[in-house]
Image (spheres, rainbow, N blue to C red):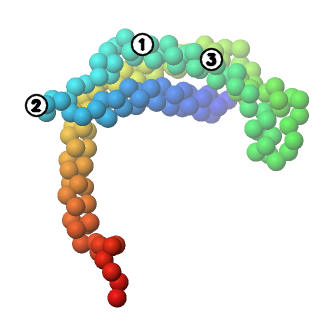
Amino acid sequence: MGAVIRKVVAMRALALLLPLALLAAPAAAAPPPPGGAIPIPPELSDPAMGEHLGKMAGALAKAMMDVPVGEVQAAVEGREPTPADRSRTVRDLAGGDPDLDRKVETQVAQAMPRLQAGMKAMAASLPAMMKAIEQAAESMEGSLDRATANMPDPTYPRR
């Protein structure tokens, strides 16, 4: 049962980190402002966002416990699903522990400080990442120009 809970928590961690990546995407896609200062999205450094994501994680955890998985299990085993398979959920695979919801909520709550620390680290490293991406783009631009300069002209007549 512990392995199932660890897998469920790992899936939840992924569900938590995906919004963080999406929060940073507009900042990464936007051109840098004049003067070289790269703005850090306020959502990344706002503790309230960490709390909001924690509440979302709790709701996702509860929802994931009721995801039907019996038909998938039957398909993996190479057999037709039974009526019992069709009603089997993640909660059932966890062994029907009546205290499971509280345990999962506790694990999610314990993960929140790490999530907030990750958001803070991401916010702190964003300017350096953006600068490295800009340098890589400039480097690629020059090498692309050199590579295309030596290509034969496709409209040149063949002999």
Tell me which label, 2 or 3, sits earlier in the chain. Answer: 2
Q: Which residue extends farthest bottom?
A: 159
> Left or right: 109 with respect to 139?
right
Q: How crowded is mark 2: few (under 14 residues within 10 Å), some or many (20 or more)?
A: few
Circle 3 residue: 62
2 or 1: mark nearer the eye: 2
**Residue 65 coordinates in the image, percent (x, y):** 67, 22
- Gap between marks 3 and 1 measured at Cα: 17 Å
- Secondary structure category for the residue under label 2: loop
Q: Is residue 110 visible in this depiction of the protein?
A: yes
Tell me which label, 3 or 1, sits earlier in the chain. Answer: 1
Note whether 144 is above or below 131 in the view shown: below
Disc 3 residue type?
Lys
Circle 1 residue: 51
Q: Is residue 94 visible in this depiction of the protein?
A: no
Disc 1 residue type?
Glu
Q: Which residue is drawn at 62% across and 33% down?
A: 3
Q: Which residue is drawn at 74% across and 32% down?
A: 69
Identify which residue, 131 or 154, lies in the foreground.
154
**Residue 28 coordinates in the image, percent (x, y):** 30, 34
Please identify the quadrant where the C terminus is shown: bottom left
- Gap between marks 2 and 3 measured at Cα: 47 Å
> Left or right: 133 with respect to 53?
left
